[in-house]
Amino acid sequence: MTLSELRRRLADGGIEDADVEARLLFCRVTGLPPHRLIGGDPACDDPALNALLEKRLSREPLAYLLGEADFFRETYRIAPGVLIPRADTERLVEEAIARIPRGARICDLCCGSGCIGISTLANRPDLSCVSVDLSPEAVALTRENAERNGVSDRLSAVCADLFALPSEISRFDALLCNPPYIARGVIPTLSPEVLREPEAALDGGDDGLDFYREIARRLPDLLKPNGLALLEIGYDQEGAVSALFRAVGASPTVLPDYGGNPRVAILSRP
Ligand code: GLN
């Protein structure tokens, strides 16, 4: 199959970014660097390319097929057990890097691939992080990604449930969290690719707010006084999440992502 055939088959299968995806899949199988594809139409007869094409046409997300994804300034190993890092979440990391006080001990709750805590540490050599996830697979990937991005000496990954946190997961200077926040009833309407991601990483309960409620309730344990929380929220959750935190005495500020949707809630522990 040639690169242009691969591109056409992806496009015919309804894949939106067929050009970019064809190049990435082609390079993955052939080992060619991306610049070698410019201006030519190379062919590849490795059956692995056809196998990846079939999986992609069945709506397996590209990041699972490539086994990695770029996020912020880093690259992460990604596997089907974790949520694929989203560009929208880079806003949270930018704000974390700019706002967290020097020398802070931070927590990345519901860490998934580990990308939020790891990209923050990779760009702030003075910080250390405890990354927490319920899924043992996510914890293992976070450790691997911390190693890969050179921050494993400052990060520990712990397997724990936010709704039953051990007492040592407490008293941080800053809390970073992209919890599952999709309202349960909305999940069946998500794209076929998103439906291949772990439901536990998406399902925020009946109204999508279960994890924010628990974080608001636990704020006095999770953070030191005046400690900072940066939380990703859904595009339509600014009012509801702000109200939850105002009810425990915090005053959240919500910043938009680059698509203009409210995305990052920032607050201090009262
Ligand atoms: N932003 C993700 C999506 O669009 C949801 C991630 C989450 O629930 N934290 O599917």
Image: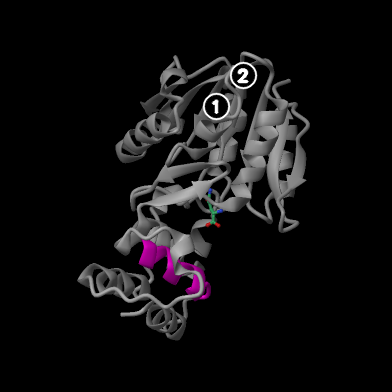
32 to the left or right of 117: left
Query: Mark 2 = which residue?
Result: 220
- In space, the residues marked 1 and 2 are separated at their CA atoms by 24 Å
Residue at horizontal 40 percent and vertical 54 percent from the top: 199
Within the image, what quadrant is residue 172 found in? top right
Q: Is residue 217 above or below residue 34?
A: above
Tell me the kind of residue under disc 2.
Pro
Can I make out residue 209 in this image?
yes
Q: Secondary structure at mark 1?
A: helix
Q: Nearer the viewer, mark 1 or mark 2?
A: 1
Q: Secondary structure at mark 2?
A: helix
Most common SS among magenta residues: helix
Can I make out residue 247 in this image?
no
* Disc marking residue 45: none
Towards the viewer: 196 or 167 = 196
88 to the left or right of 25: right
Pointer 2 local density, CA inside 10 Å: few below 14, some 14–19, many at least 20: some
Confirm or reject: label 2 Cβ below 8 Å from ligand 1. no
* Label total for image: 2
